[in-house]
């Protein structure tokens, strides 16, 4: 999953980004003013936007309003100070999905971020199941037929994303856009490497579970 943080306090933005990368395994982009944040959020398919209210150039309220007017569907988690409660109400009415009040616990923020991403993908539970494969997104653990499957970090992230989109064709481009941040140099065969590793570790060499559609992408079969 890929997250955009729009926060002008660079140290806070860095702390949030590090926590999301380490605790949730997300790809994270950080920008430090509303104008750049609006551009990035409209230009990339983020699974979540973390939005501060008090931003230079364009404030958080206007960023959100313009995102929703443009039809950007990404869930938005608002960061707010205690004296901005009326602004929070306005933002929720304008299309924000949740908020946390500064100072906040990073563990709570990560839990709220995961919940918003799950709901954005149409899932209410942290447990995903596709046939006999179970994925615990809270613990980032996988079992097949009740037996643990040990995956590398990127293999897990590919599998989790496919599970959120089970039954749908997911292109290589879509996977790259949701699994890597803006600064990553894309290599054409990296997704094939992860899919190959998943098939081997899930005992799916025949493609019974992960289907490859030549020229289109991949599908996790229901």
Image (spheres, helix red, strand yellow):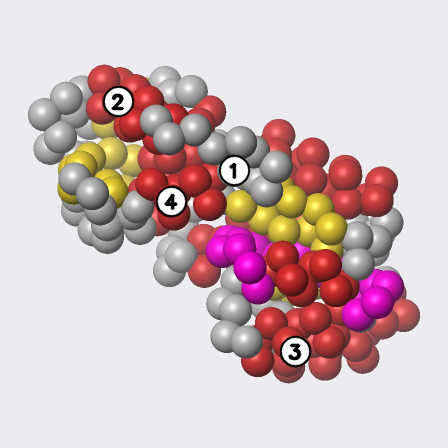
Tell me if I can see residue 193 in this picture.
yes
Residue at the spot x=30%, y=27% of the render? 192
Judge whether 138 appears above or below 33 on screen.
above
Are the residues at dot 3 and dot 4 in contact (C-beta closer than 8 Å)?
A: no
Residue designated by label 3? 65
Q: Residues within 10 Å of mark 1 (few under 14, many from 20)?
A: some
Q: Examine the structure image and report whether residue 132 is included in the region drawn in magenta.
A: no
Q: Which residues are magenta?
A: 42-58
Relative horizontal placement of residue 150, taking residue 131 as reference (left or right)? right
User: What label does residue 196 carry, if any?
Assistant: 2
Are the residues at dot 1 and dot 2 in contact (C-beta closer than 8 Å)?
A: no
Residue designated by label 1? 180
Numbered disc in front, either 4 or 1: 4
Residue at the spot x=45%, y=60% of the render? 120
User: What label does residue 173 carry, if any?
Assistant: 4
Distance from the alpha carbon under mark 3 to that under mark 4: 28 Å
Relative horizontal placement of residue 90, taking residue 150 as reference (left or right)? right
Q: Tell me which label, 1 or 3, sits earlier in the chain.
A: 3
The kind of secondary structure element at disc 4 is helix
Q: Quadrant of residue 188?
A: top left
Q: Tell me which label, 1 or 2, sits earlier in the chain.
A: 1
Residue at the spot x=29%, y=35% of the render? 134
Q: Tell me which label, 3 or 4, sits earlier in the chain.
A: 3
């Amino acid at each position: 999953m890929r997250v955009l943080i729009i926060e002008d306090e660079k140290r806070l933005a860095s702390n949030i980004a590090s926590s999301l990368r380490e605790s949730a395994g997300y790809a994270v982009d950080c920008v430090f003013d509303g104008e750049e944040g609006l551009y990035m959020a409209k230009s990339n398919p983020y699974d979540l936007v973390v939005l501060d209210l008090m931003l230079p150039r364009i404030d958080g309220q206007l960023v959100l309003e313009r995102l929703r007017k443009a039809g950007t569907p990404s869930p938005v988690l608002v960061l707010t100070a205690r004296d901005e409660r009326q602004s929070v109400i306005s933002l929720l009415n304008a299309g924000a999905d949740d908020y946390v009040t500064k100072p906040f616990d990073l563990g709570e923020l990560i839990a709220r971020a995961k919940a918003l991403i799950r709901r954005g993908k149409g899932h209410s539970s942290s447990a995903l199941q596709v046939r006999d494969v179970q994925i615990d997104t809270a613990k980032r653990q996988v079992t097949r037929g009740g037996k643990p499957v040990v995956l590398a970090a990127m293999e897990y992230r590919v599998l989790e994303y496919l599970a959120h989109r089970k039954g749908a064709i997911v292109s290589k481009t879509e996977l790259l856009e949701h699994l890597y941040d803006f600064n990553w140099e894309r290599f054409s065969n990296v997704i094939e490497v992860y899919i190959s590793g998943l098939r081997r570790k899930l005992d799916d060499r025949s493609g019974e579970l992960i289907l490859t559609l030549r020229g289109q992408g991949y599908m996790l079969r229901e």
